[in-house]
Image (cartoon, grey):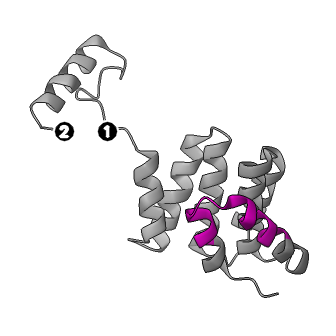
Amino acid sequence: MSFDPDYLEQLVACDAALDALGHAERAYAELPHDPTVQSYYGFLMAAERGRLRHGLELCELALGAPEHSVLVELNAARAYIKAGRKPDAVRCLQGGLARAPGHVLLVQELARLGTRQAPVLPWLPRRSWLNKQLGLIAVRLGLR
């Protein structure tokens, strides 16, 4: 069996993550030191089996590899999302986009995740009544 990240990505995109997990397990058995394999296996372990700690450890190990693809950062971000660690996910996605600007999967994941805009009045806390009201008005006027 040869490892094909495109095939795994197609399985993930088609919501066939259980099939993708089986493929990733076989790939990990053959290529346990490949960062891309580690990241797919880690993400799928977190997503499908709920083994967040083990999945995150594999993704972080893959991120630490000197030469890793942007798919590693994408999968790590997905695992962080499953673990409820949105700031870490955003950091991974932005790091991947710094290395590969315009990468479609990274852009899609970041858009799906969503990011908050800066408060209207940055010197006031985000939860300030005034910031909330001005933000609502700006949205209604189409300024944001």
Quadrant position of the C terminus in the picture:
top left
Q: Position of residue 67 (x, y in %)?
A: 67, 79
State whether residue 99 is above or below residue 107: below
The structure residue drawn at horizontal position 26% and vertical position 20%, both measured from the top left corner, is 131
Q: Position of residue 5 (x, y in %)?
A: 65, 78
Tag 2 secondary structure: loop
Tag 1 secondary structure: loop
Residue 60 visible in the shown view = no
Q: Is residue 18 magenta?
A: yes
* Earlier residue among tags 2 and 1: 1
Q: Which residue is mark 2?
A: 144
Give the total number of marks visible in the rendering.
2
Residue 115 visible in the shown view = yes
Q: Which residue is mark 1?
A: 117
Write the start and end of the magenta stretch as one range: 9-25
Q: Main secondary structure of the magenta part?
A: helix
The structure residue drawn at horizontal position 82% and vertical position 76%, both measured from the top left corner, is 27
Three-letter amino acid code of the residue under disc 1: Gln
Pointer 1 local density, CA inside 10 Å: few below 14, some 14–19, many at least 20: few
